[in-house]
Image (tube, grey):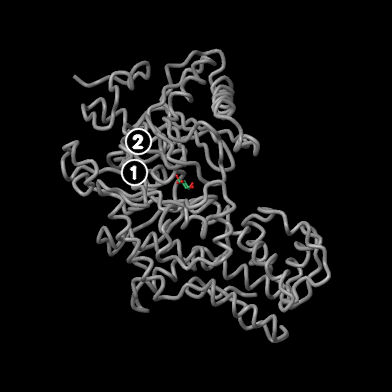
């Protein structure tokens, strides 16, 4: 099938001529529950704006809106060598980043380590031990024989962590399927540092960072029009720069009203109270069966971890409905296994270039041992389209809400993550939703654009570490617990 260009993401609605009537009815039902029309988009966005504001108040709301103590954008003049560690949902990445004198440039070396699946539900000790081992390996390999100064580290820890200081973060709750005992409710930095110390690794944590904040800062380093950093990956979230004067919950710190502060929204928690999101019974099941029911309502409808699972739950449900005639007489044991399909399964279906959907047929045959007839293939394709489109359109509501709240009529938004980078048509569908929400004239170009970001958890984390040290050197100690301690051994010194 030929793509129809960015304005009209493709749809197979027209290829249903040979689909029997009852299956057609099923498809129509799925369309009705998974479609988010323009008026719903607007309703969600307006409610989102209120919830973002609420999160900044002393009383707070569902969306955590965490002040990160990353207080300003880079100028391009940052220099030095930094380490960056990214503990994401799937991989652990360690980088060494050199920021040279040349404005806006960087050099990077990096190693990736797989996050073993069993670690995600293991013990805190195993987790920090594994992370420290990876860092040790990296430092030993790249600084062989030399004892470097304590290398300043930006640690990207992409979970909701409350930060009283920049080198501190109390994990509110695990997300993205992690379920490690003894970490929630505690500062993650001391056990991490203890594991490094035990191994004698010469690293000094300068900043604990969310991936969205890293994305915002890295993107702004190369594009000054960047206003928001987003991740659409295993999880989803955004960060933007607020003014301290607009954050009532830090009023007591008496910071200058126009001083900037990056806010890690943690918008995955939007609508945990189920006021506005058009949840289906499948979303309800995902939530109920997850390690943290009642949390991350928005994320569970749009993030990569869940897209395949929504799809799977629909198919299992239809199979059990005699009227739907789906996979009749076939053994669906493999399909019954939770989280057996990831978002790439849906992506492959949506990308199937053949009119007879033969790649989709092969996929079902190879992965699930199911033989699909043409109407069943059509249903699966349409369902993947519906789930992928819903995710992109709902995601756009979050972006639109931040822009509306801040009064930004034009903005660049830096986005990263597997869904944004790899899921077919995600960008075009998101752009289309923004158009509908803001009702831009047809002749008008996109005023708010979601663009591929710079490397947030590498370059972004290094820049935030650099900005933090610079700020301490210059005497701005807001959100710094121990200014002298933070500089110690790093080769950085407070300016006289
Ligand atoms: C986490 C966020 C993170 C996002 C994207 C969510 O599950 O709570 O901290 O930014 O995933 O990685």
Q: Residue at x 59, y 70 (%)?
A: 385
Q: Residue at x 54, y 66 (%)?
A: 425
Which picture quadrant has residue 152? top left
CB contact under 8 Å: marks 1 and 2: yes
Check residue 194 in the rendering and tell me which mark sits there, or answer none.
none
Q: Position of residue 341 (x, y in %)?
A: 67, 56
Estimate how packed mark 1 is, as few (under 14), some (14 to 19) or many (20 or more) residues with alpha carbons within 10 Å.
Answer: many
Going by the image, does 487 lie left or right of 204?
left
Q: Position of residue 271 (x, y in %)?
A: 41, 59
Instruction: Tell me the element at label 2.
Output: loop
Q: CA distance from mark 1 to mark 2?
A: 7 Å
The answer to which of 104 and 129 lies nearer the viewer is 129
Q: Residue at label 2?
A: 163
Vertically, is 356 above or below 397?
Answer: below
Vertically, is 452 above or below 68?
Answer: below
Going by the image, does 307 lie left or right of 53?
right
Q: Residue at label 1?
A: 66
Estimate how packed mark 2 is, as few (under 14), some (14 to 19) or many (20 or more) residues with alpha carbons within 10 Å.
Answer: some
Which picture quadrant has residue 462? top left
Q: Position of residue 58 (x, y in %)?
A: 25, 46
The answer to which of 401 and 292 lies nearer the viewer is 292
Instruction: Tell me the element at label 1.
Output: strand
Number of numbered discs = 2
Vertically, is 55 above or below 137?
Answer: below
State yes or no: Cβ of the residue under disc 1 lies below 8 Å from any atom of ligand 1: no
Which picture quadrant has residue 34? bottom right
Q: Position of residue 76 (x, y in %)?
A: 32, 40
Q: Considering the image in quadrants, where does the C terminus appear?
A: top left
The answer to which of 245 and 231 lies nearer the viewer is 245
Q: Earlier in the sequence, mark 1 or mark 2?
A: 1
């Amino acid at each position: 099938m030929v793509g129809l260009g960015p304005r009209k993401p493709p749809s197979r609605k027209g290829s249903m001529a040979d689909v029997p009537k009852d299956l057609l009815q099923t498809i129509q039902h799925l369309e009705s529950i998974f479609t988010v029309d323009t008026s719903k988009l607007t309703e969600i966005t307006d409610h989102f704006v209120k919830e973002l504001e609420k999160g900044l108040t002393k009383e707070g709301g569902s969306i955590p809106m965490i002040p990160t103590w990353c207080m300003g954008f880079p100028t391009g003049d940052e220099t030095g060598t930094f380490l960056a560690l990214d503990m994401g949902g799937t991989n652990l990445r360690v980088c060494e980043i050199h920021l040279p004198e040349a404005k806006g440039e960087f050099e990077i070396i990096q190693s990736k380590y797989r996050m073993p699946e069993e670690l995600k539900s293991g013990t805190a000790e195993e987790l920090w031990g594994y992370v420290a081992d990876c860092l040790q390996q990296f430092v030993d390999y790249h600084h062989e024989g030399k004892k470097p100064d304590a290398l300043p580290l930006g640690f990207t820890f992409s979970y909701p962590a409350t930060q009283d200081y920049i080198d501190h973060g109390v994990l509110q709750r695990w997300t993205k399927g992690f379920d490690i005992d003894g970490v929630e409710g505690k500062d993650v930095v001391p056990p991490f540092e203890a594991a490094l110390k035990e191994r004698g690794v010469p690293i000094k944590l300068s900043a604990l960072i969310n991936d969205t904040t890293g994305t915002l800062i890295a993107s702004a380093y190369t594009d000054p029009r960047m206003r928001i950093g987003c991740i659409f990956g295993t999880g989803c979230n955004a960060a933007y720069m607020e003014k301290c004067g607009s954050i009532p919950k830090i009023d007591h710190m008496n910071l200058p009203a126009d001083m900037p502060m990056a806010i890690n929204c943690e918008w995955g928690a939007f609508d945990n109270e189920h006021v506005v999101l058009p949840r289906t019974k499948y979303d309800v099941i995902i939530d109920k069966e997850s390690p943290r029911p009642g949390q991350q309502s928005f994320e569970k409808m749009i993030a990569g971890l869940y897209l395949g699972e929504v799809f799977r739950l629909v198919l299992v449900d239809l199979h059990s409905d005699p009227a739907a005639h789906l996979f009749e007489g076939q053994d669906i044991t493999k399909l019954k296994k939770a989280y057996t399909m990831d978002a790439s399964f849906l992506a492959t279906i949506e990308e199937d270039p053949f009119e007879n959907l033969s790649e989709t047929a092969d996929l079902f045959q190879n992965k699930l041992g199911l033989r699909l007839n043409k109407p069943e293939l059509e249903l699966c394709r349409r369902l993947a389209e519906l789930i992928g489109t819903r995710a992109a359109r709902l995601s756009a509501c979050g972006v639109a809400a931040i822009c509306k709240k801040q009064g930004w009529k034009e903005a660049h938004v830096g986005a990263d993550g597997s869904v944004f980078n790899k899921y077919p048509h995600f960008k075009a569908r998101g752009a289309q939703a923004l158009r509908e929400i803001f009702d831009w004239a047809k002749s008008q170009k996109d005023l708010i654009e979601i663009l591929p970001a710079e490397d947030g958890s590498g370059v972004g984390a290094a820049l935030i570490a650099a900005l933090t040290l610079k700020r301490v050197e210059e005497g701005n100690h807001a959100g710094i617990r121990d200014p002298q301690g933070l500089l110690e051994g790093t080769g950085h010194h407070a300016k006289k």
